Amino acid sequence: FGFHVDKNAKFKFEPIAPSSADELLLPKGFKYDVVAAYGDIINNQGDVFGFNCDFTIYFPIEGSNTRGLLWVNHEYSSDLFVHGAKSGDKYSAEQIRKMLYTQGGSIIEVYRDAAGLWKMDTSSKYARRVSGLTPFALTGPAKGSLAVGGATTVQGTFANCSGGTTLWNTVLSCEENYEATSTDAGLNMTHYGWVVEVDPFDPSFPVRKHTALGRFHHENSAMGISKDGRIVVYMGDDKTDACIYKYISDGKYVQSSGRSNTSLLENGQLYAADLRNGKWILLSHGAVNTALMNEKYVIPSAIKSTRADLLKKYTSQADVLVHVAEVAILLGATPTDRPEDLEISPFDNTIFVAHTNNDVHGNIHGHITRLFEKDNDLGATEFDFEIFAAGGRQSGFSAPDNITFDTAGNLWTVTDISSSKLGKGVYASFKNNGVFVIPTSGNQQGKALQFASAPVEAEMTGPWFTPDESTLFMAVQHPGEETKSLSDLTSRWPHRLGDHMPRPAVVAITGFKK
Ligand code: FEO
Ligand code: CA
Ligand code: CA
Ligand code: CA
């Protein structure tokens, strides 16, 4: 028994009501198992599961729906729950090491036992950590360039928010709000804000950052194929007034080449969406130069530099890639309301974008945008769009964030109302953050049904189904985030006996056996 009885049956459940309870609430007939929580040992070497888990991907082992590897992002650290407290106004060397180690990603092995419970297998030969301390190779045009201080390898990954898979069975993990950690740890900022690639099954595959995909506040990646066989990667820049991007490889995908298709992420073209004109704008050094050399070109007011300064700043494609967000605005791409997750519909190749909100412009509850590529071709340079669903009281959700599809054509949407605003003012009726199921066709299209309610101050992240949809993996991120003192906790989830603090954790959600 899973989320669909068979592939023709629509997913049915009794929607739950918003709740303020310090518990992960699910509809009748569903349960969750805590698979791994912050601080748990993941392997025989004593590696530790990181903090604030986010994106998850399940990789079946030998095609199994009951044993596989789980990649888990760890987005950020916590002074209170990781260090106990900050020492003065500077972090100690040990605190910086821990701050870097608790971020990045975990590879854990998970299995479902005879009683139907999901557990972590700590004797796994695959389980390992990738963290802010792991050396990474750079690939693509910015590798070794002056724009990254000449670096060909860099230290670590952190601020790993969401991500995606490749067609060759590796992980793409996205570095989002990298500024705080790179500043605190004294690291070169230009080495973060990239998309990183990891092979969960093979530690000998050098972990890498693909500079051809640009540097910004990467939320996630959604990979597909154009009609002529090239790789297309959709990406959002989760910042107020930031753009939607897509990358198209120069070469074509060759299935039989397996993992060597990774080189497709090293040579390609990066575009940003112009929503006024329905056009994908090419972000190239040539285009920047042409614009700046044109006397009639007017620098958009959001950019506070002179023409002479910009000409000096952009001398190569590496400069463009390191400062992509500015280049997109400079070339006329449309600033949008914080694009978080993007997904390609497996049913009709339309692109769904969670625009979480934009309080500067009064988009308080956010919306989900749907792009229609010309001729349904992911390689197109023209598109149309619509607002697929709007947040607010009527739809029942606010601040859409991660999204995923099930095989019945439902869009699963989690919400991320920030902890400080939960339960207050215009957010009061939503209570805790949740998980919603939105049909994408039929007479229920666009109607959000609540499937889960998160513990206090938590956000549900990284929804990922096993291939047979018998299990839904998710991360419970930042429970009790507003806690000011360990003696006055706002959440105790997952309520482990004798525990002194809340713990971010990955859960496996399943239906009860009939
Ligand atoms: Fe890390 Fe945009 O959420
Ligand atoms: Ca988050
Ligand atoms: Ca997010
Ligand atoms: Ca968010």
Image (spheres, rainbow, N blue to C red):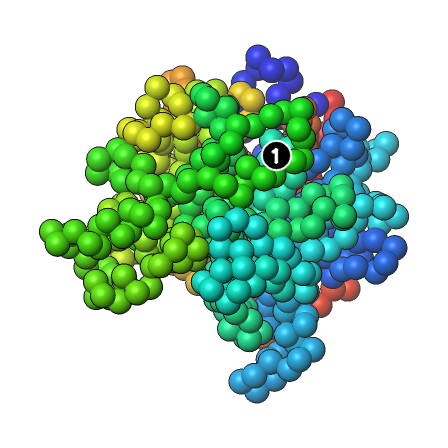
Residue 15 appears in the rendering: no
Amino acid type at image mark 1: Asn
Instruction: Indicate the quadrant containing the N terminus: top left, top right, bottom left or bottom right.
Output: top right
Q: In the image, residue 350 lies at what x, y percent? A: 40, 26
In the picture shown, does residue 265 fall above or below 363?
A: above
Badge 1 element: helix
In the picture shown, does residue 250 fall above or below 304?
A: above
In the rendered image, which quarter is residue 320 located in? bottom left
Residue that sits furthest to the left in the current view: 296
Query: Image point 46% across, 39% down: which residue?
Result: 268
Q: Nearer the viewer, residue 119 or 217?
A: 217
For mark 1, does the 10 Å Cα neighbourhood hold few (<14), some (14 to 19), or many (20 or more) residues?
some
Query: Image point 86% across, 32% down: which residue?
Result: 114
In the rendered image, which quarter is residue 82 located in? bottom right
Count of all numbered marks drawn on residues in the image: 1
Q: In the image, residue 411 lies at what x, y percent? A: 48, 30
Q: Which residue in the protein does label 1 denote?
A: 261
| Apparent side of residue 147 relative to residue 487 in the rendered image (left or right) | left
In the picture shown, does residue 386 fall above or below 320?
A: above
